[in-house]
Image: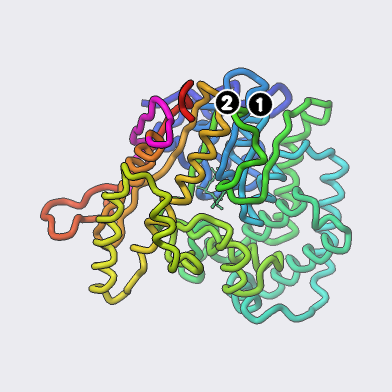
């Protein structure tokens, strides 16, 4: 079954998205259609939503408020804004937050775009006035770029710094996209170099291409279409006190999945290129430490406070989680890899409990929450994350909690000592609302 794309996704003046006549439901939660939508295509994020999914759940009346506590590159915020709603996002990652802000800022004037292009092109042509890069940065970047290309990219960055445009989120987005286009290896997901080579673009051509795309998406907005305001806070959504109680109509969000992307690792190229971090240790301190704990690389500072996290989790799921932690600890002792998966469970569910509690506080009575999340399996132990989220949300006081499967994510796990075919992992949609007596 295919669903019609939502035409009301776009305000007058925003290039319409009607070329997407229909989208198969199993593709809906993922970013697969984003590269064909105006604005979304400026920076397509592998872990992002399909805009169509957000559009289905966006507030139906203009002037509604959408909240995304895991804003990423801003898909929900862009859709909400295009539908005439205000939007609020939280994203502690210093790279993603700027991409989300660039996509949701007031549309650039043509002269501003021309200035960005001119500065970038001049910088790329001038090249890089060689100074030394920190060693881990040099080693990493020279695996991803041929030297002349890297010199042009660093030249463009230096030109942005000199012109002051380095603080401009759109200029930051443009060069970040160009950097991605010019790398010799896939870097949009888990860092795969040098095993997944790809065609590398040339900086000058890439700059023209990205600016042309933005120009064509925003040209029609020059004549004063008023876009609603969007705020993207650079902080963890564990604390959303910046959002008033009972002020949000709809939440559409997708948190990091257990044992899936390490969002600090996957942006290493950008963090190094922009000088935001200069070593793996700095990535941990400055970026990873701000994100919720979903991978074993994120355990620094969380190993010794497991019982504190456990105390925050509702009793409805605790006995299941205790069993999972025990099973994973047993497997860790037995397996050569000795992965500390057991230490992820309490921090992950405790942090998610905090965030889901904050979401409920922010929702208006009758307001809806839509959460997309996947289950996980490590060392043959299955973690039914969507089910636990649904139980936690019920325990917190959400009403009408409902969990449906959106798509399969492959057959990747077999329950230990159980015969039979492998069981599949999936991606799920949890919907719930704030009832009259919810808090
Ligand atoms: C699945 S992605 C969301 C993608 C988003 N839906 C989009 O379309 O771009 C999850 C995001 O959560 C962010 N994140 C991790 N920990 C967070 C926290 N404590 N508070 C807010 N966001 C967090 C990650 O940096 C990542 O960008």
Residue at which label 2 appears: 249
Q: Position of residue 365 (x, y in %)?
A: 53, 22
Q: Is residue 397 magenta?
A: yes
| Residue sitting at x 85%, y 47% | 114
Q: Position of residue 257 (x, y in %)?
A: 43, 51
| Residue sitting at x 51%, y 55% | 292
Q: Secondary structure at mark 2?
A: strand
Residue 98 drawn above or below residue 387: below
Q: CA distance from mark 2 to mark 1?
A: 10 Å
Residue at which label 1 appears: 85
**4 left or right of 19 in image:** left
Asked if marks 2 and 1 touch (Cβ < 8 Å), the reply is yes
Q: Which residues are magenta?
A: 395-410
Count of numbered badges drawn on the protein? 2
Which quadrant of the view contains residue 81? top right
Residue sitting nearer the eye, 228 or 163: 228
First in sequence: mark 2 vs mark 1: 1
Q: Position of residue 376 (x, y in %)?
A: 34, 52
**137 left or right of 291 in image:** right
Residue sitting nearer the eye, 328 or 191: 328
Q: Position of residue 331 (x, y in %)?
A: 25, 67
Residue 387 drawn above or below residue 273: above
Residue 237 drawn above or below residue 66: below
């Amino acid at each position: 079954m295919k669903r019609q794309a939502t035409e009301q996704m776009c305000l007058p003046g925003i290039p319409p998205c009607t070329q997407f006549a229909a989208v198969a439901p199993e593709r809906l939660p993922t970013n697969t259609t984003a590269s064909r939508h105006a604005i979304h295509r400026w920076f397509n994020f592998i872990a992002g939503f399909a805009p169509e999914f957000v559009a289905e759940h966006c507030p139906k009346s203009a002037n509604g408020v959408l909240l995304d506590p895991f804003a990423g590159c801003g898909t929900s915020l862009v859709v909400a804004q295009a539908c005439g709603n205000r939007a609020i996002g939280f994203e502690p990652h210093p790279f993603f937050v700027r991409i989300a802000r660039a996509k949701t800022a007031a549309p650039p004037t043509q002269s501003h775009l021309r200035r960005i292009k001119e500065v970038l092109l001049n910088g790329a042509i001038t090249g890089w006035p060689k100074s030394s890069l920190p060693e881990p940065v040099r080693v990493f970047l020279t695996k991803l770029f041929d030297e002349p290309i890297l010199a042009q990219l660093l030249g463009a960055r230096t030109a942005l710094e000199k012109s002051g445009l380095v603080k401009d989120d759109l200029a930051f987005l443009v060069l970040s996209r160009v950097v991605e286009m010019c790398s010799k290896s896939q870097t949009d997901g888990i860092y795969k170099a040098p095993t997944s080579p790809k065609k590398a673009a040339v900086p000058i051509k890439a700059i023209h291409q990205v600016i042309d795309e933005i120009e064509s998406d925003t040209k029609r907005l020059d004549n004063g279409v008023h876009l609603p305001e969007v705020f993207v806070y650079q902080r963890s959504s564990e604390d959303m006190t910046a959002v008033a109680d009972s002020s949000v109509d709809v939440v559409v969000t997708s948190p990091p999945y257990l044992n899936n992307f390490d969002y600090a690792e996957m942006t290493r190229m950008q963090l190094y290129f922009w000088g935001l971090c200069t070593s793996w240790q700095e990535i941990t301190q400055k970026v990873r430490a701000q994100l919720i704990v979903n991978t074993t690389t994120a355990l620094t500072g969380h190993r010794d406070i497991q019982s504190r996290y456990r105390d925050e989790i509702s009793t409805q799921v605790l006995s299941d989680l205790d069993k999972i932690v025990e099973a994973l600890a047993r497997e860790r002792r037995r397996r050569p890899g000795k992965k500390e998966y057991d230490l992820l469970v309490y921090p992950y569910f405790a942090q998610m409990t905090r965030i889901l509690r904050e979401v409920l506080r922010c929702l208006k009575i009758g307001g809806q929450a839509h959460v997309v999340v996947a289950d996980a399996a490590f060392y043959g132990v299955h973690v039914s994350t969507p089910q636990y989220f649904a139980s936690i949300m019920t325990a917190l006081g959400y009403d009408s909690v409902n969990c449906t499967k959106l798509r399969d994510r492959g057959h990747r796990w077999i329950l230990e000592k159980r015969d039979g075919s492998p069981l599949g992992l999936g991606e799920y949609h949890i919907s719930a609302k704030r009832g009259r007596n919810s808090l």
